[in-house]
Amino acid sequence: MEEIFKKSLEAQLEKLSNKSQKNLDKKLVRAVCAALLEVFCTIPARKADTPRAAYFSAEFLTGSFVTGSLATLNLWGICEQVLKQKGYNIEALEKPRDPALGNGGLGRLAACLLDSAAATDIPLDGYGIRYRYGIFRQDIKNCEQTEQIDIWQDNCPLEKQRRDEAVLVQFGDTDVLAVPYDVPIVGKNQINRLRLWSAEATSPVDFTAFSEGNICSAFSKMMDAEAISGFLYPPDNTEAGKELRLKQQYFFSSASVQSILRDFKKTARPIGELSDYIKIQLNDTHPTVAIPELLRLLCEDFGRDFETALKICGEIFSYTNHTVMAEALECWNEALFCRVVPKVYPYVVMLNNHLMQRLKGNKNLSRISIIENGVIRMANMAVYVSHKINGVAKIHSEIIKESIFKDFYELYPERFLNITNGIAHRRWLCLANRGLTHFANSRLGTDWQENLPLLEQIKQFNSTADLDELAKIKAENKKALAKYLKNNFELSLDPDYMFSVQIKRIHEYKRQLLNILSVLGLYIDLKNGELKDFYPTAFIFAGKAASGYYNAKQIIKLINAVSRLIEKDETAKKYFKVLFIPDYNVKNAMKIIPAADLSEQLSTAGTEASGTGNMKLSLNGAPTIGTLDGANIEIVDYAGEENNYIFGAKKEELACLTNYDPMNIYYSSDRISRVVDLLKQGPAGDFTALFNSLLFGDDADRYKVLLDYPSYQNARLRANEDYKNSRLYAEKSLINIAAASHFSADQTVGNYNKKIWKLM
Ligand SMILES: *Cc1c(COP(=O)(O)O)cnc(C)c1O
């Protein structure tokens, strides 16, 4: 494989050398793609009747497909070598913008599972939407987030349009053409595929209207259709926005189900065997409408009766829950649903009737039903039909059984299971952290790269020389990040500071507010002469706020305002740096994570389903400062509490906490009140909205920022103290790297197969 790639790339570069050097980066990417495609030709194609699984997801946060393929096939080294020989730099491959097809952890998990399935010979295909613009591109202006559309699509040279496999999706008002774009997701022994659908009008222009001069109405069908695959998560605070979301969900669910049925026909097997051929994993509730759609097609196109069709669907579908936040469990107004997808609606009614019939007499019927008071509850539908329902970390899988799905758990306990998330270590370690990869290779050989649990053995290498080398690798990564930020964002960062890193979507439950308030607290202490021997620290943030989420945007503004405040203060800037890195995405994450000294995982206990950022940071040697929430719990189980900085109320403690009143904390603690007071017309500006959210209203301080503030501040000072002893800190780092070997997405996707899909 390596030989073919090398020869092909050399030939491609030879051709390049005679051409103009304009757009060189793009040309280099194309050259590497061409060489990759030649390698792909040598990998056996899957047989038409191979049983397979399909991952339905509204998001795939893949990062570059080119670097991803190089990582899985372990061709990065040779690629770098060939490029270098010809006088080129491999950094060219990191220039194109990432595909803007995802928002956060849910989309990144989808990408990690696809990568790992391909690498471990599990036939798993992804199905989603090829968003024209996807998630917005974030910039910071005057401390605030600004949003621009992201033109990324000319950057995806490995994808292939398959117009010959287009399908028609029928809505109440019109039909839309779904055109698939396929990206090969490669492993060494097989090729899977990510199929993304783009929406087009069946007849783009109404020529009669056009010739009458009604230009707008002539093109309106085209615009309506293309809006469907325009943006990720249209704002759902208007009726039009809600309708568009429902259209998106049905669009890709229906197209994917139709495409799977078409592929199945090629096997010439009877429809009764469909569930031996395909398993469909619903990544959260967004694609749940695929269930009534498949029911409909089985009944109407394949002549099955409802009961038989339902049984087949039950064997095919399973559902992964990603959050216990009630607002994220998809619900549709019944009238809207009926209007937008009238052909599917009767099957939802039949499903609901089926449930009411079967569970007649259950005292919680009004909680369990699929339709209640004119609302269709997609999560209930998913749980009622699916044969397996999983949470994404141990604590989360317990929580869903006790809370949102309690009634269903009592009825169908055998359906519920846990599959803890994992990460594609080929990308997040082998590719992102070459120094650490070399450290491991030179001690363990390279087998761990295909079998991450073997990396656990790295913990034996804790001699002084080993630890010094490890610390040096981290220092190099920090320098590399500083350089990257200077070159790409004109941001300055002193690599000698400790890097404390909180990178994730901005959300109140993730508590970036706790982090930045604590920085303000340290600032006050410094000014009062109460902060002794503090090791200079850079508090690094990155993440996007949903465009309609006011408080999250205020938090971004606050972080940037505090950054300016400190920058202007000659004393403070010797100890602190606050840095907000704009436009968080996979590419930036790959630079930031290997440089982190401390991983900030601050969610209120019981709110973060799993997290995967925590795993990536741990695998790259950053101890966690965090709550006992999500996968932090499992990280600490493996790595030991003494090698991490755990703080805050536990989930059980919060459950007992009735009548929480943050005002009491505010009045009883000077340390807290003087920090919170800074939000009101303090030196960083006016953040009254955040001030009020912490102290007033029915749900004052919903996420218990003030409650956990003192223990967080303590943990932070402990970490800072430990960091001064670089060898001690490197040892903690080493233990975390070894422990994170438990979080391979290879293992995670293997568990999906072993416990749910049972392919092969
Ligand atoms: C891993 C990752 C996430 C998820 O981060 P969490 O800390 O688990 O929320 C989000 N965005 C990107 C780009 C990632 O790589």
Image (cartoon, rainbow, N blue to C red):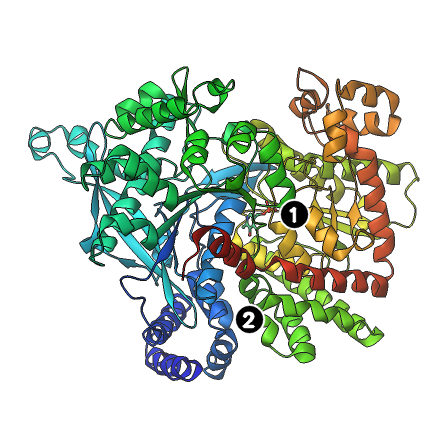
Residue 248 bears which disc, if any?
Answer: none
Q: Is residue 758 visible?
A: yes
Please name the residue that numbered disc 1 is placed on. Answer: 631
Check disc 1 and report its element: helix, strand or loop.
loop
Ligand 1 has an atom within 8 Å of the beta carbon of the residue at disc 2: no
User: If the image is split into quadrants, where does the C terminus sit?
Assistant: bottom left
Q: Residues within 10 Å of mark 2 (few under 14, many from 20)?
A: some
Q: CA distance from mark 1 to mark 2?
A: 23 Å
Residue 93: image x %, image y %? 46, 66
- Count of labels shown? 2
Q: In the drawing, does residue 400 fall left or right of residue 642?
A: left
Q: Residue at x 43, y 35 (%)?
A: 382
Residue 219: image x %, image y %? 18, 34
Camera-side residue of 596 and 104 = 104
Q: Amino acid at mark 1?
A: Ala
Camera-side residue of 736 and 508 = 736
Residue 683: image x %, image y %? 75, 30
Dividing the picture into quarters, in which one does residue 215 lie?
top left
Q: Amino acid at mark 2?
A: Glu
Q: In the drawing, does residue 686 fall left or right of residue 758?
A: right
Q: Is residue 608 visible?
A: no
Please name the residue that numbered disc 2 is placed on. Answer: 450
Dividing the picture into quarters, in which one does residue 203 lie?
top left
Q: In the drawing, does residue 572 fall left or right of residue 94?
A: right
Q: Residue at x 44, y 59 (%)?
A: 96
Q: In the drawing, does residue 398 fall left or right of residue 102?
A: right
Camera-side residue of 306 and 78 = 306
Up the image or down, 205 lies above or below 83; here it is: above
Residue 631: image x %, image y %? 65, 47
